[in-house]
Amino acid sequence: MKASGSGAQENGVRVGTTGGGVNTAPPVLAISSPGGQTVRGVPLLPAAVPLPPTTPGAPPPAGAPPCGSFAAAIDPGPPPSTPDSSEPARHAHKRTHANSNGDPTLTVPRVLHMPLESRDAVDRHKAAAKQIRGATASILRAGGGSDVKTPREIAARAVCMGVMTFRSRFEGVRFAGDAAATQEAAEMIAGVTGWLFDAGLSPSLIKAEADLLKLKPNSWERPVLVAIGEAMVPESIGVLLAGLNLVSEIPPYDRAADAEPLLRMLPFLSDSPFVTRPGMPPREEWEAMATGVTPAAAAEIAGAESVAGLYWWRAVSESLVRAGKMPRARVAEILRDGEARARVLEIPYVKGDFKAFGKPYATLTADEHKAASMIAEARVRAFRWLLDDDVPWDAVPMDS
């Protein structure tokens, strides 16, 4: 889908996008005078601002997605833009949005994080064996589609998580010590937070999100930003948009989704395809998305959930093996017994194990294993939420 190139007339300054669609290089916001002369080109995607260590010389906060093979997914974008003083703060977030390919600790919110080793190893083993042998049955079971969330519910969850992602990005700007950038970030934060409430989406927030959004700009603390960075929320957003037929393909489970085109789908940004004319009120922008999407087939969602669930099982089982809580021989036996069915689901195998980062899963480095685990967790949570019309986001069962 192509991004809209429309702009908004605010106090004599037109703010619009020039160049670029969803699949092109990042466009530039053209801030122009009423006569149409371009005053300044502003990069659409600001760079992430890394969180400094808690104490001088200390290592960065733990929990961020690793580098190495994962580095291509977290390459920083261009530098932050300079705010235009004539544009009201409530519209500031329309000027630019976060490039999730920047600093990994600022890109994404996990709610309900469950440590991989938090369950009894025997229970995990039984669940894993049952899932890898029954994946095909789960596809057939969901064929009726009666339990799938409605398109409006799916769209609302995607937008709420997008707003949290966007705000978290700018909440970290102040740690760089740049007063001007911090002020611009505050305008961005106020703008996107105000948009969500003006759109009438506050009832769709879970409590943790609502509590954070009530806080004044530039007040989220370091532990919050680290937790958000660990969440890989663009992975969940991608799944939700796939559930609305807005994303055609889920990336492999050893590669993070490109969050930039995902965020640009959401109507709090002016280049969203649902923002179809200048000056649309937030509620109208939201309704354009809520009423303009259609759900994917339940059987397709269930099939993708089966794949995500198996990758989540593999992440958990590998963590248990490395923690000494499950024999590797037992995991190898389960993998051997389930290989034929896993191949039906197009899960690549190499040397009797799931293939990730071009090698058997059991041989992944600690960083590679962590990256694959975080991707699988974020995606499987979203798929399971989609397939249960009763479960709230913060109560999705994460048994492997």
Image (cartoon, rainbow, N blue to C red):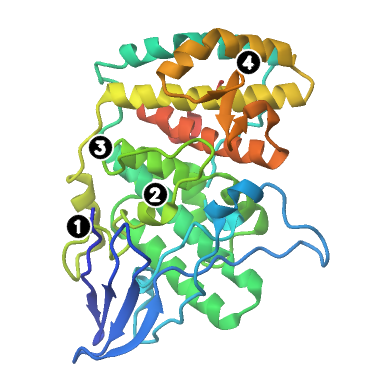
Frontmost residue, 239 versus 78 = 78
Label 2 element class = helix
- The correct choice, above or below, for 374 with respect to 56 in the image is above
Q: CA distance from mark 4 to mark 3?
A: 33 Å
Tell me, yes or no, whether the two marked residues, 4 and 1, touch with CB atoms within 8 Å: no
Q: Considering the numbered disc 1 on the image, is that residue within a helix, a strand or a loop?
A: helix
Describe the element under mark 3 as helix, strand or loop: helix
Q: Are marks 4 and 2 in contact (CB under 8 Å)?
A: no
Q: Position of residue 11 (x, y in %)?
A: 26, 85
Residue marked by disc 2: 160
Count of all numbered marks drawn on residues in the image: 4
Question: Which residue lies most toward the right here?
Answer: 57
Which callout, 4 or 1, points to the residue nearer the camera?
4
Left/right placement of residue 391 relative to residue 358 reads left
Q: Nearer the viewer, mark 1 or mark 3?
A: 3
Residue shown at 76% from the left, 26% from the top: 322
How far apart marks 1 and 2 lie (CA) works out to: 16 Å
Nearer-N-terminus badge (4/3)? 4
Residue at point 65% right, 77% down?
177
Q: In this figure, which residue is indicated by the disc labeled 1?
A: 284
The residue closer to the viewer here, 344 or 276, is: 344
Give the amino acid type for the residue marked by disc 2 in the picture: Cys
Q: Nearer the viewer, mark 4 or mark 2?
A: 4
Residue of label 4? 124
Q: Is residue 109 above or below residue 353?
A: below
Question: Which label's residue is closer to the chain start, 2 or 3?
Answer: 3
Residue type marked 1 = Glu
Mark 2 near mark 3, Cβ–Cβ under 8 Å? no
Helix, strand or loop at mark 4: helix
| Sequence order check, earlier mark of 1 and 2 | 2
Front residue of 51 and 200: 51
Which residue in the protein does label 3 denote? 151
